[in-house]
Amino acid sequence: MDHSKLRPESLMMSYGYKPELSQGAVKCPIFQTSTFVFQKAEDGKAFFEVAYGLRERSEGEELGLIYSRLNNPDLEILENRLGLWENAGDCAVFESGMSAITTTLLEFLSPGDLLLFSNPIYGGTDHFIKQILTRFGIHVLGFYPWEQDRLEEIVRKSGKADRLKMIYVETPANPTNILIDIAACSRLAKTFGTSEKPVLLAVDNTYMGPLWQHPMKQGADLVLYSATKYIGGHSDVIAGACLGSKELIGRVKGLRSFLGCMAGPWTGWLLLRSLETLKPRMETQASNAAEVAAFLKGHPKVRKVHYLGFINEPAQQAIYKNQCFSAGAMLSFDVQGGEPEAFRFLNALQLVKLAVSLGSTESLAEHPATMTHVGVDPAEREKLGITGGLVRLSVGVEHPDDLIGDLKQALEAV
Ligand SMILES: *Cc1c(COP(=O)(O)O)cnc(C)c1O
């Protein structure tokens, strides 16, 4: 059997793990150890030479296990499996989505460089870009989805086009599901980049998980995840990941080992377990979301549903067709009225939990304007359509009729 032809979901239970190295255990054990014994001093010397980049790995030479801040079997197997979904050269896992994002930004940006980024963006990322990166003399320039077709002009007008180093996008945008064209951003990166000084394109793909959008196929160099969301999928672990070419991830792993923000073995093991059910979970969530969205669309107390399956604007539709494999399981909607009506709805929910976060087996609802997006300037919130009546839903794996029943009774309270 040609294992290179197997699909990722067929490999999630076994890939990269050798039972004979672990007493025949069918599952990878938790390697809860800080350090690893070298068989002889020469081995330790060889492992360090490779880990510190003092020489290239020779043909077939594996990086020996040294110390769990540098490598650990639970993390390495997890990284290999995560990479399969997108055919990435390599992957680095982190103790949180934020540490994946911040380590990646810090590795590739230097004082004087320009970072172009899409709005709206995850609150933690927004804060890091505007408040922390700027402290180190990095120039940052945000753009809105409706400015997508004049990005080249925006970059040129900034006067720092020659220092453009990275384009960072999050698509679909949270919480309104507006899409950013990844392929167009990749062309923009090529317009301003040269072979000596490439402009990198990084995409936060958390909202679509590894199943529904493959940014590297659209030209992205780096793909970031909060693995807390779909990848972990059970609301029981915080973790993150960065995927890309061997060369770029080598650099990310280098900085990760000095910042010390790698995931621990227990987190790695939890995510290995989660990956086995990634596809069935996400597919059930997406089909539930389609039913929930259809129910909400026809409801008299709902003004508008923001769901990728309902796009009718032609430019957005074209992006959707080109880069998304599914409408996903995240949607938001405006209840008739404002904050009081949205709160009445949220407080009346029984099956759906009132909590932030997303992508998990249980359905979650929250109020972006006063919760996840409370840090966004009110005028900007209004511009982005984050109104008082907006509710965000992450649809889980419950029976769709039960979900709809809960939403229905909660809407009656509005
Ligand atoms: C949750 C989230 C993050 C941050 O991830 P943590 O795991 O909470 O650190 C980043 N980006 C997006 C889109 C997210 O939803």
Image (cartoon, helix red, strand yellow):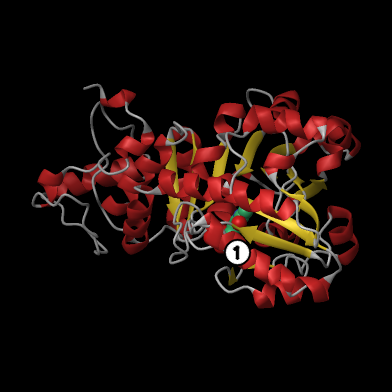
Tell me which residue sits at (37%, 61%) in the image.
267
Q: Position of residue 280 (x, y in %)?
A: 42, 45
In this view of the protein, which residue sits in the foreground, 15 or 178? 178
Tell me which residue sits at (16%, 49%) in the image.
26
Indicate the secondary structure of the residue bearing disc 1: helix
Tell me which residue sits at (48%, 56%) in the image.
397
Is 147 left, or right, of 219 in this rendering? Answer: right
Q: Position of residue 309 (x, y in %)?
A: 68, 40
In this view of the protein, which residue sits in the foreground, 322 or 223? 322
Q: Position of residue 199 (x, y in %)?
A: 67, 33
Q: Quadrant of residue 370?
A: bottom right
Q: Is residue 398 above or below residue 338?
A: above
Q: Quadrant of ligand 1?
A: bottom right
Is 315 left, or right, of 68 in this rendering? Answer: right
Mark 1 belongs to which amino acid?
Gly
Q: Is residue 274 above or below residue 218?
A: below
Is 222 left, or right, of 305 in this rendering? Answer: left
Q: Quadrant of residue 95?
A: bottom left
Q: Quadrant location of the N terminus?
A: top left
Q: Is residue 380 above or below residue 315?
A: below
